[in-house]
Amino acid sequence: MLAELRQSPFLDDLTPADRRVVPLLLTLPIGVIAALLAAVIAGLAVFVAFAVFGGGVAAVERLMEMISQGKAPSGLTEIAFVLTLLAVVNGAMALAFVGAAALLHHRRLMSYLTAAPRFRWRLLLLGLGLFAATIGPLLLASAALDPKAPGAPILAISPDLGGRLVYVAVVVMLLLIAAAAEELVFRGWLIKIVGAWFPDPRAVLVISGLLFSAIHFDPNLDAFLVRLAMGVGLAWMTLRLGGIEFAVGAHAANNIVILLFVQPMALKPEAPHAFPPETLVIAPLMLAGYVALAEIAARWAPLRRWTRLAAT
């Protein structure tokens, strides 16, 4: 299967110009400054929107105090505010950073998303659905077998069906945006950079996966290995399918299943703990699942036709 990765259309447009050192060195400071400015503007927009439509300035101040103290959001308004802030700010930062990189490398921004002429929304939906239907039940089973599991957040968020449906809509929409922001940076921009310097796809997979896991700054080795497996798997999807669309769907589905059915949102990082040995089994199985999903999408003719992958 590595042969298909070596022929990935996502890396076909790389040229010696992509290995220029000066644009790469300038991308970090300029991209970070652009991202921080975008974060400030996006954050202010969220504050104003919630102040106008969510209860006034005092309500927003209480929400910000909750975030500063690291308290877990519990009500629908609190969760909607945190998710909106996460999605809008991260989305703005990702667009600003990758947009700066595109200008410095004289590239189209779209080239960091897909090798296709346009963004393939059906491929994103396929990643979302396939992950939810295959790996999603495994996440639910692991939560059901855990005696310390807190219970499904969707059941605790509201006693009535209407509140739960609003929670589902908020989680799905905003986590899709947040996942797209991460994929644009870590699978779109980063894979292009690593692929320009290291043409071997194994190097692209490992380096991008390591950086994706390391940037979360989690002190626990099991979390690092799980994110490494996830990062490598999402990079495989991007190379195999010629764009980040499928990876966005799978990444979002993972977060959506967790926030709906596995555990509630937490603002504090997980405390250091002993290494659970079962991680050595779970992480490789997770990676195998991600690779299998990409291969199903790439090889199954009906799916290739529906997603228009065959025309890429």
Image: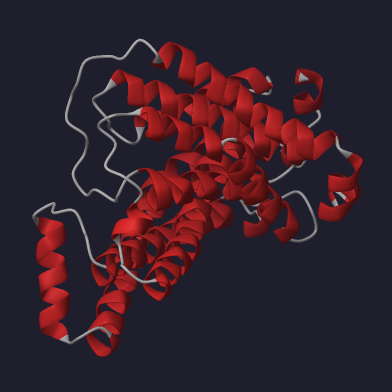
Q: Nearer the viewer, residue 216 or 169?
A: 169
Q: What is the x, y in percent for residue 302?
A: 89, 46
Q: Residue at the location (75% across, 27% down)? A: 5
| Residue 211 horizontal side relative to residue 288, left or right | left
| Image vertical order of residue 125 relative to residue 88, above or below | above
Coloration of the structure image:
secondary structure
Q: Nearer the viewer, residue 265 or 187?
A: 265
| Image vertical order of residue 247 relative to residue 33, above or below | above
- Residue 258 shows in this picture: yes
Q: What is the x, y in percent for residue 259?
A: 39, 50
Q: What is the x, y in percent for residue 14?
A: 72, 38
Q: Nearer the viewer, residue 135 or 58?
A: 135
| Image vertical order of residue 245 relative to residue 270, above or below | below
Q: What is the x, y in percent for residue 254?
A: 50, 43
Quadrant for the N terminus, please: top right
- Residue 210 shows in this picture: no
Number of numbered callouts drawn: 0
| Residue 116 horizontal side relative to residue 107, left or right | right
| Residue 208 horizontal side relative to residue 290, left or right | left
Q: Residue at the location (39% across, 13% down)? A: 278
| Quadrant of the image occupied by residue 263 | top left
Q: Nearer the viewer, residue 237 or 62?
A: 62
Q: Residue at the location (31% across, 14% down)? A: 276
| Residue 22 horizontal side relative to residue 306, left or right | left
